[in-house]
Image (cartoon, grey):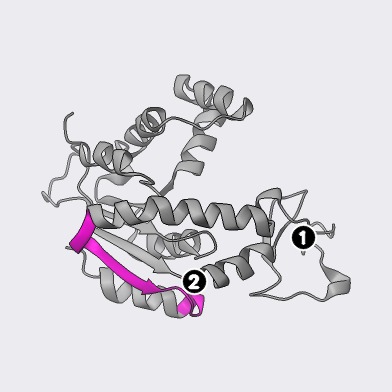
């Protein structure tokens, strides 16, 4: 498998940063903040899937069929979509991966097209993750996400700020479902963290969003 190459007049090696963390750790939020600071694209598999489905590409149609059937998208198909995305011109200086790779085989595939510079592990306890997730609510109309634990709303006014409809709890945010997801994360994360070894930087995720972002910035700037 050939390494991905971008036209780069300054001959600057692309910066690739991976964010790991259990459900509720805030890695998606931090990836967006870091993306703006470094002016690098933030890439998640969920976004890639949605874009491919919306664009009705050949791979997108395959993903849509698999998701609609309730199955998991294979490592190979996920990687093929990722490879297409990171080959785009905006990834020439690098990119930020949110929650990918999830397994060692995926990490091996990624190594064939890009070298990961740093892995940020946002650490929160299972107790904290559980509190955050079982208190997460979503607007059934616009999809906006709220959290009654980190940003409480009056019990009589648990409504979407935009749509003014009652917020709902997603099926995968129940206590039983969250515990299963956390167990799976830990099972998958340990081999990955061992795989990346010296590239892993631990970040305390049980702080304010602003403090976590500051700690991340201290550890990734400058990127090397």
Q: Position of residue 155 (x, y in %)?
A: 84, 73
- Left or right: residue 51 compared with residue 189: right
Q: Residue at x 48, y 80 (%)?
A: 207
Q: Position of residue 166 (x, y in %)?
A: 84, 59
Q: Residue furthest left?
A: 11
The residue stretch that appears in magenta: 196-210
Task: Say which quadrant the C terminus sits in.
Answer: bottom left
- What is the crowding at mark 2: few (fewer than 14 residues within 10 Å), some, or many (at least 20)? some
Q: Is residue 82 above or below residue 160?
A: above
> Does residue 21 appear anywhere in the picture?
yes
Looking at this view, is 97 or 6 the one in front? 97
> Does residue 89 appear anywhere in the picture?
no
Determine the secondary structure under disc 1: loop
Residue at mark 1: 162
Residue 199 badge? none
Q: CA distance from mark 1 to mark 2?
A: 32 Å
- Left or right: residue 155 compared with residue 132: right
Residue at mark 2: 125
Task: Say which quadrant the N terminus sits in.
Answer: top left
How many labels were placed on the picture?
2
Of the numbered discs 1 and 2, the one sitting upstream in the chain is 2
Q: Are marks 1 and 2 in contact (CB under 8 Å)?
A: no
Quadrant of residue 173 within the rendered picture: bottom right
Determine the secondary structure under disc 2: loop
Quadrant of residue 120 within the rendered picture: bottom left
């Amino acid at each position: 498998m050939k390494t991905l190459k971008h036209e780069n007049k300054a001959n600057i090696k692309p910066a690739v940063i991976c964010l790991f963390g259990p459900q509720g750790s805030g890695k998606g939020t931090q990836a967006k903040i870091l993306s703006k600071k470094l002016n690098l694209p933030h890439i998640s598999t969920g976004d890639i899937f949605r874009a491919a489905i919306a664009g009705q590409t050949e791979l997108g149609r395959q993903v849509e069929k698999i998701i609609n059937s309730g199955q998991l998208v294979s490592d190979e198909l996920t990687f093929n979509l990722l490879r297409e995305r990171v080959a785009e011109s905006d990834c020439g200086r690098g990119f930020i991966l949110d929650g990918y790779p999830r397994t060692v085989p995926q990490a091996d595939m990624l190594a064939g097209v890009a070298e990961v510079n740093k892995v940020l592990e946002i650490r929160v306890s299972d107790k904290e993750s559980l509190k955050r997730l079982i208190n997460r609510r979503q607007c059934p109309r616009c999809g906006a996400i709220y959290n009654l634990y980190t940003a409480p709303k009056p019990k009589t006014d648990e409504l979407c700020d935009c749509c003014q409809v009652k917020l709902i709890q997603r099926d995968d945010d129940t206590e039983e479902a969250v515990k299963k997801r956390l167990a799976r994360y830990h099972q998958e994360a340990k081999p990955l963290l061992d795989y990346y070894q010296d590239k892993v930087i631990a970040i305390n995720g049980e702080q304010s969003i602003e403090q976590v972002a500051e700690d991340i910035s201290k550890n990734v700037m400058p990127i090397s």
